[in-house]
Amino acid sequence: MTSALSFLVAARRCEIDELEQLARTCELVQELSELVHRLQRERGASNVYLASAGQRYAAELDERIAACAAAEVRVRDWLDGLERREGALAGGVRLFTRIAVGVHALDQLPALREAVRAQACSAQEATRRYNRAVAALLALVFEAADVAVDPAVSRPLVGLFNLMQGKEFAGQERAAGAAAFAAGRIGSDEIQQLVHLIESQEQCFERFESFCADEVLTQWRALQATMPLSELERLRRKLVAAAPAAALDGALADVWFDCCSQRLDQIHEVEAHLATSLQQACERKIATTRAELEDQQAMLEALRAQPDAPAPLTVLVGGDPAAPGGEAGWEGGEGALRGGDGLGPRLTRSILDTLQAQSRRLQAMGDELATVRATLDERKLIERAKGLLMAHQGLSEEEAYRLLRQTAMNQGRRLVDVAQAVLAMAELLPGAVLKRP
C-alpha cells in the first residue's frame, strides 16, 4: 500500500526538478545581465556618436556593437536549448511570452544599428529604441524572479532585478546627459527626465539593498565608496540647473560619459557577483535536497523490507503537522506506532521527524515567498497604473510615473495604494483617471 513516506520522496523529486529548472533560469539571468550591460554600453556610445554628428565614438561604437552581438549569441543559444527541452515548465506561459517579446526586441537591433551608423535617426529616437530592447530583457529577469519557488533564490533574484533596473535608469541617465552635453544644450523636458531617472534609480537601489544578503551588501557599499559620486553630482548640477536652451560645455560630454561609465561598470561587478552567487545557491540547494532524498529513500526501503509492517499511512494518526497545533499530536501518533505497528522506534522516529521537518520548512518557505511576492505584485500594480495613464491621458512613461508619485506625496499615501486607486477608478471611469497637475 502506498505510504506517506513514499509521497515525501515524490515531493523531494519534484522539488529537485523545480530547483534544476530554477538553476537553468539563473543561467539565463546571468547571460541576460551581461547582454544588458553591453547593450547599455552600445546605447551610450551611439548617443555620443549621433549627438556629435558622427564626430565622436565612431570606433568605440563598432567595438561595443561587436561585444553586444557576442553576448546576444550566448543568450540565443541558451534560448534555443530551452526550446528543445521537453516537459512542462513552471510559469511556462508567462516565461515563454516574455522570451518571445525579448527575442523580437533583439531582432530589431540590426535595423537600429544601421540607422545609427547612417545617422538616420536622432540620439533621442535611438535611445528610445535601445530602451525598449533593454526593457524587454529586464522584463524577462522579472519573470524569472516571479516564478522562483525557493526563497533562498527568489530573494536574491528580486534583489538582482532591482539592481539591474536601477542600473538601467543610471544607463539612461548616462545616455541623456551625454546627448545633452554633446549637443551643447538641454531643454526643460530633458531636465525633468534626468530628475526622474535619478530618483528612480535610487529607489531601485534601496529595494536591492533590502533583498540582498549581508555579503553582497558589504561589497555594494565598498564599491559605492570608490564610485565617482562627487564628480557625478557636480556634472548633474550643471545639467539640472541649466537654463533651458542655455549653452553647455560640449567638452564635458566625454567627462560625463566616462564618469557614468565607471559607475555603471562598478555596479555591474556587483550584478555579476550576485548572478554567480545565485547559480551557486541553486547548486547547493540541489545537492542538499538530493542528500535528503537519498535519506528518505533509504527509510522507505527499510520500511518496505519489513514484511509484517502495516500500511505506513498510520504515521499520520495522532496529528497533522501541517494543521494549526498539529505537531502537539505527534507524540500520540508515535506512541501508537511503537505500540503495535511492527516498525522499530528508530524508524518511526525518523519518519515523524522527516514529516515534521518538511512541514516546518514548507511553512517557512511559504511565509518568505509571500513577502517576496508582495514586492513583485506592488511593481505589477504600479506598471499597470502607469500603462493606464499613458493610454488614457497620452502621457510618457516618465510623466505617468511622476503623476503617480506626486499624487502619493500630496495625499500622504503609498505609491502602490495610489496605483490601486487608479486601476479601481478605471473600471468605472476609463476616460477620467487622474487629472494632470
Image (tube, rainbow, N blue to C red):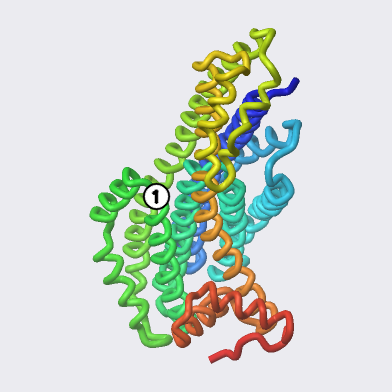
Q: What quarter of the picture does the N terminus occupy? A: top right
Could you tell me which secondary element the residue under label 1 belongs to? loop
Query: Visible in this render: residue 58?
Result: no
Tell me the residue at 51%/41% (across/down): 30
> What x and y, as percent, mark residue 4?
66, 27
Is 259 placed left or right of 321 in the picture?
left
Query: Visible in this render: residue 221?
Result: yes
Residue 124's place in the image compared with 304, above or below, is below
Label 1: which residue? Answer: 212
Tell me the residue at 28%/53% (across/down): 221
Residue 414's place in the image compared with 24, above or below, is below
Tell me the residue at 42%/53% (across/down): 211
Count of picture labels: 1
Residue 419's place in the image compared with 355, above or below, is below
> What x and y, as percent, mark residue 114?
63, 56
Amino acid type of the residue that numbered disc 1 sits on in the rendered structure: Cys
Indicate the quadrant where residue 252 lies. bottom left
Is 322 placed left or right of 244 in the picture?
right
**Farthest-out residue, front:** 339
Is 117 placed left or right of 182 in the picture?
right
Front one among 15 and 385? 15
> What x and y, as percent, mark residue 91?
68, 46
